[in-house]
Amino acid sequence: GDSVTQMEGPVTLSEEAFLTINCTYTATGYPSLFWYVQYPGEGLQLLLKATKADDKGSNKGFEATYRKETTSFHLEKGSVQVSDSAVYFCALEPNSGNTPLVFGKGTRLSVIA
Amino acid sequence: GAVVSQHPSRVICKSGTSVKIECRSLDFQATTMFWYRQFPKQSLMLMATSNEGSKATYEQGVEKDKFLINHASLTLSTLTVTSAHPEDSSFYICSARPSSGDYNEQFFGPGTRLTVL
């Protein structure tokens, strides 16, 4: 079945460091890909998404490019801030229809000043 | 954007009692809503798919008599944890996708943290 694999954390970075969180997926067809962020004690917020190959999603300085050839959707940010500390989930939606998302296990990011 | 609310946000109950969690789409209609469960420091696991006007579809391993789902209208789905026990303590999150319009994503509620004593 469809699955998402993301790098295990926790990841600890100093402020202004470069961030990469790897995400690869297995799916049939052409899924949509997402990154969600969960701040402590809160629900999930959509960070960015891409719906087809070579699309780049971006938001709040975060970017991820849908790479069909490597089945990847790695999350990057050039300069992290303390406020970016959260858990990040990579997810896919198997079809464009009304289907549940398949989530990775999440990566906890801690940014220290 | 579209908003999904959940009520309550937190609930503490005694073992053996039942707890109802509501999931509402505030400004859109959704024929389908999804219920997820998140254990501490773990990912979201799909529990069931809630279908308006029909029975919910449960994932393997999820007890349908334990987790009752009712999707009585296009804007409301409820999850009732019956005879709750401490192992049911978890973070429950719902999501919904607008049935119409230009939205191309699912919207998540803020979650309900259930603690069973």
Image: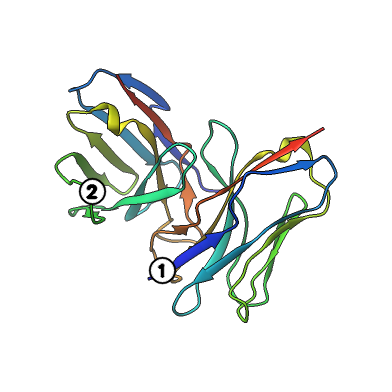
User: Front-most of B85 and A55?
Assistant: B85
Task: Name the residue: 60% across, 56% down.
Answer: A7
Decide: is A54 above or below A98: below
Task: Name the residue: 48% across, 50% down.
Answer: B107
Secondary structure type for disc 2: loop
- Judged from this view, the residue extending furthest toward the left is B65
The percent coordinates of residue B40 (x first, y second) are 45, 36
2 and 1 marks in contact (CB < 8 Å): no
Is residue A91 in view? Answer: yes
Which residue matches tag 1?
A97
Secondary structure type for disc 1: loop
In the rendered structure, the answer to whether residue B102 lies left or right of residue B115 reads right
Chain on which label 1 sits: A
The percent coordinates of residue B74 (x first, y second) are 31, 49
Chain on which label 2 sits: B
What amino acid does circle 1 point to? Answer: Gly
In the rendered structure, the answer to whether residue A57 lies left or right of residue B98 reads right
Decide: is B5 above or below A77: above
Residue A109: name its quadrant: top right
Task: Name the residue: 37% across, 34% down.
Answer: B90
- Colour setup of the view: rainbow
Which residue matches tag 2?
B62
The percent coordinates of residue A60 (x first, y second) are 75, 49
Residue A52: name its quadrant: bottom right
The percent coordinates of residue B82 (x first, y second) are 18, 32
Label 2 – label 1 distance at C-alpha: 24 Å
